[in-house]
Image (tube, grey):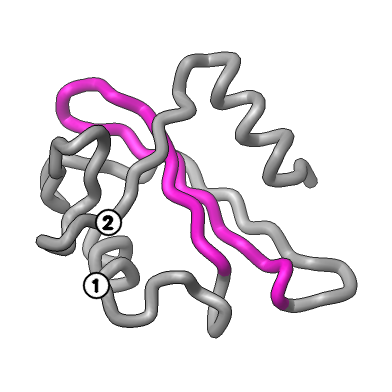
């Protein structure tokens, strides 16, 4: 299995290292442009599990937008999520 940094480097080599974040309207956003759940598609998922520490677990979603932008969203996995109350989990599940 690849490491997070290996996957991020591969995305960078392909100019797909755009990091989507969740904005205040609970939509994924890139450089100030918001995308609704209908505007994006998860095209690949990477799940990383820490060998010695569950807190090292993460999930990376490679995302394609309706206007052709490819990027990613990275989050800690499970109870260690960085998105407790911002709607991120609901949005990802709806996609």
Give how far across and how far down residue 8 sits, in percent: 61, 34
| Residue with the mark numbered 2 | 22
Q: Residues within 10 Å of mark 1 (few under 14, many from 20)?
A: some
Label 2 residue SS: strand
Q: Residues within 10 Å of mark 2 (few under 14, many from 20)?
A: some
Position of 13 compared to 40: left or right?
right
Per the rendered image, the range of residues in magenta is: 55-76
Q: Is residue 84 magenta?
A: no
Give how far across and how far down residue 4 sits, in percent: 68, 45
Q: Nearer the viewer, residue 56 or 67?
A: 56
Kindly indicate the quadrant of the structure image that contains residue 31: top left
Q: Residue at x 46, y 70 (%)?
A: 82
Q: Nearer the viewer, residue 52 or 25?
A: 25
Give how far across and how far down residue 6 sits, in percent: 73, 34
Determine the residue located farthest toward the right in the rendered image: 52
Label 1 residue SS: loop
| Residue with the mark numbered 1 | 87
Q: Residue at x 23, y 50 (%)?
A: 28
Q: Quadrant of the C terminus?
A: bottom left
Q: Residue at x 17, y 55 (%)?
A: 27
Kindly indicate the quadrant of the structure image that contains residue 65: top left
Against 25, residue 30 (above or below) is: above
Against 19, residue 26 (above or below) is: below
């Amino acid at each position: 299995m690849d490491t997070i940094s290996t996957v991020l480097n591969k995305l960078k080599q392909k100019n797909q290292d755009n990091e989507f974040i969740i904005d205040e309207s609970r939509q994924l956003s890139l450089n100030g442009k918001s995308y609704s759940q209908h505007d994006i598609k998860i095209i690949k998922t990477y799940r990383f599990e820490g060998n010695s520490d569950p807190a090292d677990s993460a999930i990376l979603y490679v995302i394609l937008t309706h206007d052709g932008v490819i990027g990613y969203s990275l989050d800690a996995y499970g109870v260690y999520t960085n998105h407790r109350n911002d709607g991120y989990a609901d949005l990802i599940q709806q996609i």
